[in-house]
Image: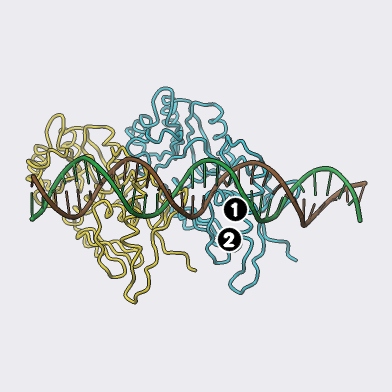
Chain colours: A cyan, B yellow, C brown, D green
Amino acid sequence: MTSTAAEARLLVVDDEPNIRELLSTSLRFAGFEVHTAADGQEALSQAERTRPDLVVLDVMLPDLDGFAVTRRLRERGRDVPVLFLTAKDDVADRVAGLTVGGDDYVTKPFSLEEVVARIRAVLRRTGSGADPAAGRLVFADLEMDEDSHEVHRAGHAVELSPTEFKLLRYLMLNPNRVLSKTQILDHVWHYDFGGEAGIVESYISYLRRKIDTGTDAEGNPVKPLIHTRRGVGYVLRLPPAA
Amino acid sequence: MTSTAAEARLLVVDDEPNIRELLSTSLRFAGFEVHTAADGQEALSQAERTRPDLVVLDVMLPDLDGFAVTRRLRERGRDVPVLFLTAKDDVADRVAGLTVGGDDYVTKPFSLEEVVARIRAVLRRTGSGADPAAGRLVFADLEMDEDSHEVHRAGHAVELSPTEFKLLRYLMLNPNRVLSKTQILDHVWHYDFGGEAGIVESYISYLRRKIDTGTDAEGNPVKPLIHTRRGVGYVLRLPPAA
DNA sequence: TTCGGCGTTCAGACTCCTCTCATGACCAGC
DNA sequence: GCTGGTCATGAGAGGAGTCTGAACGCCGAA
């Protein structure tokens, strides 16, 4: 995750300490200023004090639920956008219009990639953002549009599965940086994924097949962008000059 | 919902906090400046202060009903247009008489798509609006007239059912953006719709049959505009270049 | 009342995705 | 050149996601 100047101020609300910790650490590293709260009441007072640009809010809280918190936040005139965290079987619990306005939601267990991407997407939609490059990742002749989920290599459209897409986004957010398989697993896969790191190798292989093969407009083979650092991990970068 | 500079100032009047919240959040995100009131008296004083361009008014209020509020508003010389919210069984008798002038009404439970579309339609009719493109949505060779409810694909008229129409409008308001099934459900269907997201798949299927099949003027098959992003949602966009 | 259109649900078929496993290639150090 | 470890890739099982047709109830129009 590239960390720049503080991108935005977030409030993370979850009663499970592990989740709170996981999120706040990762989001701070992703460049956000992060405050936390463990329940609805604390969330309201924290929001009052810290004036977040976005609230990451677990729907299931011990006191007030996420909807009550949202309503009270907005009754106070703060129409701050919310990213809801919800269990998969709570879908019925979705209640009227979880995703109204600029809001969005992510189901637990989530991947960190997913959360960061959704936060950025919500801020992009609701923020003052007039950034033309918003939602667009570019590395060499490889381009990704996060809103339409489109990927192009050397001008050609590439179809990626959801996991392939998330993996490539993670690589493109960290160009020229070697990422270990464990790191990739921790960011791209669900936080309670039980499998082995071998799956990363498989998906790197799929990605290479889709973006590092084929030819450009003149018929020359494209230069590979995904490189193996044996014993270390993988890196997205331009191939060495010669 | 594309959000632009504040389009107009609205006053939302409803005694149910959830409905008020749902409406104000969504309408703000749709680009309106929104004030709220919980009963008739508050509505009158808010209208006095904020001078709205349109009032969204629940007919059933704890103190004054929608008639009285409207009458008093107009006695004060404010001929602001009103969009009434009414329960289904109130329709026959009373509401019809209410909708004099540029007014309109929507029955509860409503869909957000519907409310936003009606508000825009009323403002278009009554406002100073001289926008030539008003009420007209175009994407590639697909055209929709929101006022006449007409849809054309490659020059051919297409007949759509009401739900199909709303779904297509939502897609056309968000071109090149992947919309999840939940998002679509929340915007296009009634806010208390209890069903599953499967219905979205069905209606996408109907829409495809009507607008993504057939041929253009030269007899070439039309290019599909509705695309599935497996595991993510649907997107309205031009097919990949080649 | 009958009829037809519409909204909704459901089930089956199908496609695509995820993940694991096994094999063989590759690489670095000796 | 060996050798042990690492990595690339294909095959395939199983599952999740998707599409479509059929059926039913509702409602408004005739």
Residue type, numbered disc 2: Leu
Comparing A126 with A9, the one in front is A126
Q: Position of residue B198 (x, y in %)?
A: 37, 45
| Horizontal arrangement in the rendering, residue A230 relative to residue B181 (left or right) | right
The answer to whether residue A11 is above or below residue A231 is above
Which quarter of the figure has residue B152? bottom left
The residue under label 2 is A142
Image spot of residue B182 (x, y percent): 38, 44
Residue drawn at x 45%, y 25% as measured from the top left = A39
Residue lying at 12% horizontally and 46% vertically, measured from the top left: B78
* Residue count near mark 1 (Cα–Cα under 10 Å), binned few <14, some 14–19, many ≥20: many
Determine the secondary structure under disc 1: helix
Q: Is residue A233 above or below residue A45?
A: below
Mark 2 or mark 1, earlier in chain: 2
* Kind of element beneath mark 2: strand
The residue closer to the viewer here, C22 or A127, is C22
Q: Quadrant of residue B225?
A: bottom left
- Residue type at mark 1 is Met
Q: Chain of mark 1?
A: A
Residue A75: image tag:
none
The residue that label 1 is drawn on is A172
